[in-house]
Image (cartoon, rainbow, N blue to C red):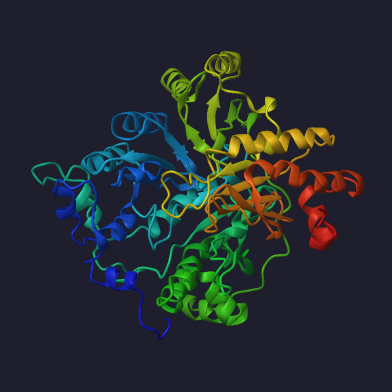
Amino acid sequence: MADDKPSKLEVIKDSSDYLRGTIEEDLSNSEPNVHGDNAQLLKFHGTYQQDNRDERGSGSKSYSFMVRSRIPGGKVTADQFLAELDIADKYANQTVRVTDRQGFQLHGVVKGNLKETIRGINESKLSTLSACGDVCRNFMCCPAPHNNSPVHDQMQALAAELAQHFAPQSTAYSEIWLTDDEGEKTKVSEVSFDEPIYGKTYLPRKFKMAIALPEDNCVDIYTQDLGLMAIVEDEKIVGYNVLVGGGQGMTPAKKNTFPAVGQKLTFITPDQVVAVCEAVVKVQRDFGNRADRRQARMKYLIHNWGLEKFKAKVEEYYGNSLPEPHATDVTDVDDHMGWHDQGDGKLFLGINVESGRIKDEGDFRLKTALRVLLNKYGMETRLTALQGIILCDIDSSDKLEIESILKDHGVTLAEKLSLARRFSFACPALPTCGLAIAESERVMPSVIDSIDAVMQEHGLGEERISVHMTGCPNGCARPYTPDVGLVGKARGKYTLYLGGNAQGTRIGFIHKDMVPEEEIGSTLSPVLAKFKSERTENEAFGDFCHRIGKEALAVE
């Protein structure tokens, strides 16, 4: 831990009585918002206090809460999915958002409905605990239900095991949210109280983990604090490469902040995973910066120490030496959209959800379509890191009817979408995010329209180009690693990054700053023309930009 004075949030956590604060008192009054410390503590319980920025001109803030469900590996039963839709209709803004960490988010929940919302989520056997806050967040994992091999099942099982192992142990969550009006517990599993992994002040900052395969890095393990890449031999996971120090957030005005991709730390066998991950988390707990939250992510600890010193400290906490990483690395990525053979005689269907927003709006009625499908077929579902939905365990005899139901509700099947649209996503940004500088989700469809049009002009309509967009530099939609990154810089203007890749293994460079939203397509046009004429055989767009470099692409 840094020797400097702890930040304000460290003081709040230290005096919170293991995340209790005075949340109960705040929830019981008639005011529309919670105050001060409690707004910070609520994040650990899976909810952010927000206000509608479109309505700020009215003279008072229109408060509501975002509620996020933590769903390891994105695995959701039909009943759980339907329950989330019901809760959204009853207590939120009638939409559900699939997050880029394979969870659900509800927006527009007023304070008076917050307890019923979180209780309802728990009654469906999901949870909001540690979906936010300075803890290990949702554990991501490749969601594809390939049942002809045990590999995917093993990865999913590990994600669930790690989620359980790193869940906060304080009973504050159950005491506040899972009691009825008479104070009786409605769904409580009593656990210990002393937070053996996190301690009294939890972690210095949020901590993200994910599990992927070399040939399918669909969960972007290089952008995580800790990534596990499964090494498979003879259809069996023999171990994992451990990557550490990824992270997407930055503050442009602070030159000592930056996005980073993970570095290879070691190779470990399956029986070592939990203990080594715990050692990494504890090193960050004890030595991460608790004075300056802008320097609190583990990537800065590793940057300041160097990987060799960091590994030595992890070995000390683990109690044994750790070998060098395996030579295997990420080679590709899959969005899992469209129809696929599960390998057990069944099919799965990936449905692209633009910016993850499940809603009924005009002729587009995805929410109703999902209700129809889940009620009729009762299939398990999976959420993807590109904010899509996978419907699992489908009989081939039902394929045409399922397609018909989707089409009748205005839902476009994956094969009718460009790859640029399929590999794009955006953060919510305005009007609910308090950090947003520019639009993201609300303008992303038109931005992709313009990029698609320019790609068609240059004969690149079938090219896979990943586009991530955020309303600010905090990087929630991982904008620094794709082929094209768009980061909100001012109202209606974006910093345009190039040179990453769809595999998420490389940080891009700034191609142009302060690009107006309506000029994004035209700004990319000369770069795409150069790519078309100068690329090598089968070279991807991001690889081309990286190869020829920033200066060569500086075309006015």
Using the image as rendered, state which of residue 146 and residue 446 is in the foreground. 446
Residue 132 in view here = yes
In percent of width and height, residue 241 lies at 63, 63
Is 357 drawn above or below residue 329 in the view shown?
above
Q: At which x and y percent is residue 399? A: 60, 18
Q: Which residue is at a point 22% across and 46% down the rendered structure image?
A: 32
Q: Position of residue 328 (x, y in %)?
A: 72, 60
Say whether residue 392 is left or right of residue 287: right
Residue that sits furthest to the bottom in the current view: 3
Q: State the residue at coordinates (77%, 37%).
A: 454
The one of 412 and 71 positioned closer to us in this rendering = 412
Asked if residue 413 is positioned above or below residue 461 in the image, the reply reads above
- Residue at (70%, 32%) from the top-left corner? 418
Residue 336 visible here = no
Q: How many marks?
A: 0
Q: Nearer the viewer, residue 454 or 8?
A: 454
The N terminus - image quarter: bottom left
Residue 190 location, x and y as percent? Answer: 22, 54
The answer to whether 506 appears left or right of 258 in the picture is right
Q: Is residue 338 left or right of residue 551?
A: left
Lateral position of residue 84 relative to residue 307, left or right: left
